[in-house]
Each structure stands twice: as structure tokens, then as C-alpha cells.
Amino acid sequence: YGKYMEALVSKGFKVARVEQTETPDETKVRVKAVKAKGRKPGKVEAGMRREICSLTTPGTRLYTVLDMRAEKDGGGFEEVKGATLLAAVLVRGSKVGACLCDCPTGSVELAEFEDDATFARLRTLLAAKPPAEILVERGAARVAEIVGRATGAAVEMLEPDDEFPGAAAAID
């Protein structure tokens, strides 16, 4: 998994890991309960349940045991190439808030500062700490364009309050 995940993520794809979430015995019990209700289980309903257990993007790679190469491929981890930081940027007027998270190490850095119309300080911050991926509010197309051009990182635009929670929701 690790070898192919790394290849796809480094090309900008999001990779979902899907795993079985029940045992064969649990599947039999579930199907038996459906039949007891007088219904014939459909093809999907009769199959073993599987769910997305993780989603990996350029900024959320963790390099865990699950990402190791097979022994026949030499074992060990794929080489970490390039930036690993995930950045979230929020702009309100001339104020900029930034969060830089290094997922493999678990380190987090927060910054809040006044910036000019060209976002010179934000661009300086992102040049000093280049991210692999940047999260920006949907509707902030100008900010997304500027940070994308300045860093070459993948930019993901998220829906305000739904996918990109504000401070009040993040604190609760």
C-alpha cells in the first residue's frame, strides 16, 4: 500500500484506505437478521462491510507501519520527498491567521499577523516553512491563488463553517 499511496499522493491525488469493519461471523449474523425480517438481502447488503478508514493527501501523510514496503520490495519506508507540512490559512480583512501542522511529527505552529494587500508576510512565512498542502476557505480565491503560486503546494478550498470551522466551533 505504502509504495502506491506515496506515488499517487506525490502526483496530487487523494488516497482513501478502505478496510473491512466486520468479521465473517458478524456478516452472517447481520444477514441472518435481515432474512429473519422476511427480506432477501441485496448483493451489497449481503457482503462484508467496508469503510474508508483514512484519507491521505500531500499534507496528511504519516509514514506509519501501514505505509511500509513489503519485505520482497526491500522493506522499510518510502523515502520522504519534499514538504510534509499542512497549512491552514484564514484571512479576515488585513488580519491573517495561519496554522502549520507537520503530521508525521505532530508539531503545530500558529501565527496571527497584520498583512498588506499583497500578502507579503504570508508569502514570507510560507517560503520559510514550505507546505505540501494549503487549506483555504472557499470564496477566498485570491488568497488561494497567491499562496498556490508562491509555494507550488496543493491548495484545497473548504466550505466555511462546514468543512473549515471557525474559532468558536474549533474551541467547543
Image (cartoon, rainbow, N blue to C red):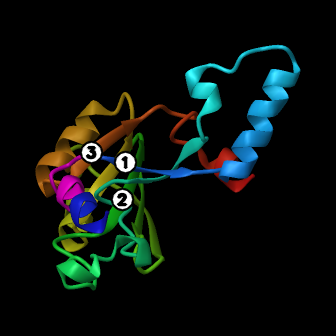
Disc 2 to disc 3, C-alpha distance: 9 Å
Q: Is residue 121 visible?
A: no
In the rendering, which numbered label is found on residue 87?
2
Where disc 2 sits, the SS reads: strand
**Are the two marked residues, 2 and 1, in contact with CB atoms closer than 8 angstroms?**
yes
Q: 10 Å neighbourhood of mark 3: few (<14), some, or many (≥20)?
A: many
Per the image, label 3 sits on a secondary structure element best described as: strand
State which region is magenta. 7-13
Q: Nearer the viewer, residue 121 or 45?
A: 45
Q: Residue at x 16, y 73 (%)?
A: 81
Mark 3 and mark 2 in contact (Cβ < 8 Å)?
Answer: no
Residue type for callout 1? Leu
Q: Is residue 12 magenta?
A: yes
**Residue 126 visible in the current orientation:** yes
Q: Where residue 156 appears, x then y in whole percent?
A: 32, 42
Q: Earlier in the sequence, mark 2 or mark 3?
A: 2
Residue at which label 3 appears: 155
